[in-house]
Structure formats: structure tokens, C-alpha cells
Amino acid sequence: MKIWTDEMIALLGTESDTALGDRWGMSRMTVARKRQTLAIAPYDLKQGGFQRETLFRWSPENLALLGKEPDATVARRLGISRRAVYLMRLRQGLAPAKRAPRVYSLPPAAVPLLGKLRDAELAHRFGIPDDLVYRERKRRDIPKLQDEKPLSEALLADLGTDSDRAIGLRHGVHYSKVRQLRLKRQIPAYKRPNRKKMAAGGTATDGGHRR
């Protein structure tokens, strides 16, 4: 179970949930759920009409990544767009990182770890592409690591009672997973009440006609 320190709580809302999640090794949903529990407003990426790239604070540690790793890799690590990384690298006068030679086979030491680590984690440990790990695992019929928490009864009971995204944030689950669970159980998507029709004397479902 993740322990929230006072320092971590103090940072909630000062940066994007994605950036903080990457820093602390947890998902964006986990950060968002904790922030919402404490009634902390999300980081406003467009306050004052500025773009996200303008608001991001480039620390010396972040700048040190430029040109050493591909722009896309740096962007994912910092929780910003690839274009933001590209523009800052140009401003620093740095050439792009050299593309590593393509790897077509798994290192022998990586094979026993297939299915015991996440594909992305295994790829990062050995410096190989994610898709190579995925293909080799599937070729050997090795199931992926199942590290998801058991679904709570409260989450299942909420399906269809609110938007998939809202339910996902409430329970710390990605909205695509909520949608998948809802469709599997043939539960229709939540539709917000039509206030105009209700004010006119109808309901959200009868189209405003009375019998």
C-alpha cells in the first residue's frame, strides 16, 4: 500500500497528476483519487491562457535528459508533450539522441522473466523495445503479469450510474477498464438528465411527452 508523506500531499495540485504519478511510481488515477479525497483542485494547465509547455518548469535535472534519450521517452517521463521536449532541445542547441540499434531477439537472461514482470518494465531493464517483449511472450503463450487489484463490489454497483470517467476517478481505475466492465455486463452508458426537458414538464427519458 502506498504511503502518502506530508511532502507528497503538499505537491498535489501543483503539477499535473500524470507528472506526479511518474515521479512517485504510481498511476495518474491513484494521484487524482488522493487529490480528490483531500478536495484539492487539479493543476490548471491553461491558466491565464497559456499552453501546457509554457507552464512546465524545466529543472536542471529535466534539462539533463535532453539529447540523451529520444524526445518521446523524455516526454513520457516528464508528463509533457513530445513537441515541448523537441522545442526545448532546439533552444538548448542539442542534437537528438541517436537511435539505438534495433534488437530482434531477447537477451537470454530476459526469457525467464517473461510474464513475471510487466512488458514495459522488462523492456526497460534490458534496454529493448516493448513490442519485442510482447511478441516473444505471446509466441511462447506466456500470459501477461496479472497484478490488478480485485474489483470491488462498490465499483461494480456504480457501473452505469455515472460517466465511465467519473467512476474511474472515484475508484482509481482507468475509464477504459470501467467501460469494458460495463459493456461486458450489458449495462447501458449513463445519460445525464436533460434539464431543459425536465423544466418543461417532461422527463429525461420520455422526450417531454406526457401520457
Image (cartoon, rainbow, N blue to C red):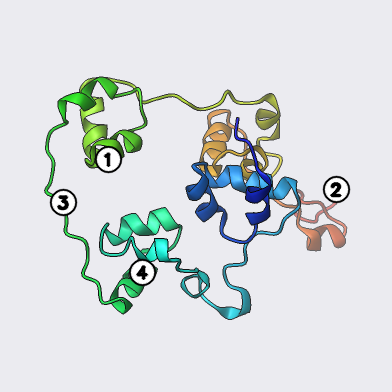
Q: Taking 39 as reference, is 201 left or right?
A: right
Q: What's the CA distance linking mark 1 and mark 3?
A: 14 Å
Q: Position of residue 112 (x, y in %)?
A: 25, 20
Ranked by sequence position, the earlier of labels 2 and 4 is: 4
Q: Can residue 166 be seen in this view?
A: no
Q: What's the CA distance linking mark 3 and mark 4?
A: 21 Å
Ranked by sequence position, the earlier of labels 1 and 4 is: 4
Q: What residue type is labelled 3?
A: Ala
Q: Position of residue 152 (x, y in %)?
A: 65, 26
Q: What element carries label 3?
A: loop
Which image quadrant is residue 75 in? bottom left
Ranked by sequence position, the earlier of labels 1 and 2 is: 1
Q: Which of 188 and 24 is in front in this view?
A: 24
Which residue was labeled with disc 4?
83
| Mark 2 burial class by Cα count in 10 Å: few <14, some 14-19, many 20+ | few
Q: What's the CA distance linking mark 2 and mark 4?
A: 57 Å
**Picture residue at 35% right of the left edge, 58% below the top:** 74
Q: What element carries label 4?
A: helix
Q: Which amino acid does label 4 sit on?
A: Arg
Q: What's the CA distance linking mark 3 and mark 2?
A: 70 Å
Are the two marked residues, 3 and 2, in contact with CB atoms closer than 8 angstroms? no
Q: Is residue 59 visible?
A: yes
Of tags 2 and 4, the one toward the viewer is: 4
| Mark 4 burial class by Cα count in 10 Å: few <14, some 14-19, many 20+ | few
